[in-house]
Image: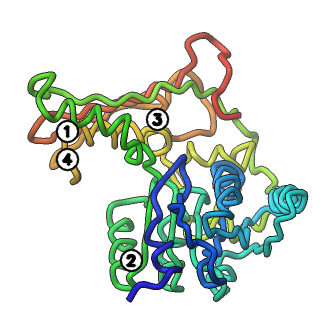
Amino acid sequence: MTNRRRFLTQSVAASTGVFYIAKTSWAQKSPGDTINMAVIGFGGRGSSHISGYKGLKDEGVRLAALCDVDSNVMSKHVQALDKDKIKVTPYTDMRRVFDDKSIDAVSIATPNHWHALASIWAIQAGKDVYVEKPVSHCVWEGRQIVKAARKHSKIVQTGTQARSSRTGLAAAVKFVQDGNLGKILLSRGLCYKKRGSIGKAEGEQKVPDSVEFDLWCGPGPKKPLSRKRLHYDWHWTWDYGNGDLGNQGIHQMDIARWFLGESELSPVVWSVGGRLGYEDDGETANTQIIYHGYEKAPLIFEVRGLPSVKDGKDMDK
């Protein structure tokens, strides 16, 4: 039999990038109905997770814990929540979050290289999981998350939020798939997001004193910091990120695949591109074309990261 807590947890669906718990008339009839959430990693996207969860109190969700390896980031958010009269338990090491038996579910917005292992650890500890995209560094890692979720009967959801647009995009997809525009010959996704240079550092850079660097690196290689900024610019290095192909582009590729009616990896894929327009410490392509050879029709995805004018303003600084 499903109890109220389990029913609430199983009612989770994506909405603006975080869990949405369906409203019910009995949501808070007993303490067991409350889902205690922990957010892990919130220097960027995780801030939106915090905002989303703290607004779900009436739906049976309690923001109970925060975890980040940067003490400056942690103190900033704890103080802000204190002003809202929300008390959370702060953690530096995510393993201590997983040890906490009072936590029911975790929301993971760490750098990409942590996503798979953090999700698997959380599942093994009995937590349901929301994890930001991309869920893994490679296909094999992603399959391990699926296996762990099935083995331990846990809910795992990732942040391809466009799929939650049931009256907008979903209606458009149905319109096209019903043949109203004829046969689909090509599905195309675009990521035109201007990204300025991250600069070129002169030698090894100092890791901020507020950061537990061993925990930041985690399952990724621990190398000397060779870019000017530790946070966010990891997106443009292969060890920790994967450029806009897997940062912003994963959303547009998913929508393009949705229109095709495909739910599997393409049988053929190739890509060409490079980091063009400047020389800096970034490694990932800012100009790229990816071809997915689906049988119904090809899916072509394109990244354009250069500003339209020299020294154009960056999108995420």
Observer able to see residue 72: no
Q: Nearer the viewer, residue 21 or 161?
A: 21
Q: Residue at x 71, y 59 (%)?
A: 54
Q: Residue at x 66, y 70 (%)?
A: 38
Q: Which residue is mark 1?
A: 260
Q: Which residue is mark 3?
A: 285
* Label 2 environment density (alpha carbons within 10 Å; few <14, some 14–19, many ≥20): many
Mark drawn on residue 262: 4
Q: Quadrant of residue 288?
A: top left
Going from N to C along the chain, the mark reached first, 3 or 4, is 4
Structural distance between the alpha carbons of marks 2 and 4: 23 Å
Expressed as whole percent of the image width and height from the top left, the position of residue 10 reads 43, 71
Structural distance between the alpha carbons of marks 1 and 3: 26 Å
* Label 1 environment density (alpha carbons within 10 Å; few <14, some 14–19, many ≥20): many
Q: Quadrant of the C terminus?
A: top right
Q: Amino acid at mark 1?
A: Leu
Q: Amino acid at mark 4?
A: Glu
Structural distance between the alpha carbons of marks 2 and 3: 33 Å
Expressed as whole percent of the image width and height from the top left, the position of residue 209 reads 87, 61
Going from N to C along the chain, the mark reached first, 2 or 1, is 2
Vertical position of residue 298 compared to residue 8: above or below:
above
Q: Residue at x 14, y 28 (%)?
A: 184
Vertical position of residue 278 compared to residue 157: above or below:
above
Q: Residue at x 66, y 26 (%)?
A: 314
Vertical position of residue 230 compared to residue 311: above or below:
below
Q: Quadrant of residue 105?
A: bottom right
**Is there a contact, CB below 8 Å, between mark 4 and mark 1?**
yes
Q: Which residue is mark 2?
A: 149
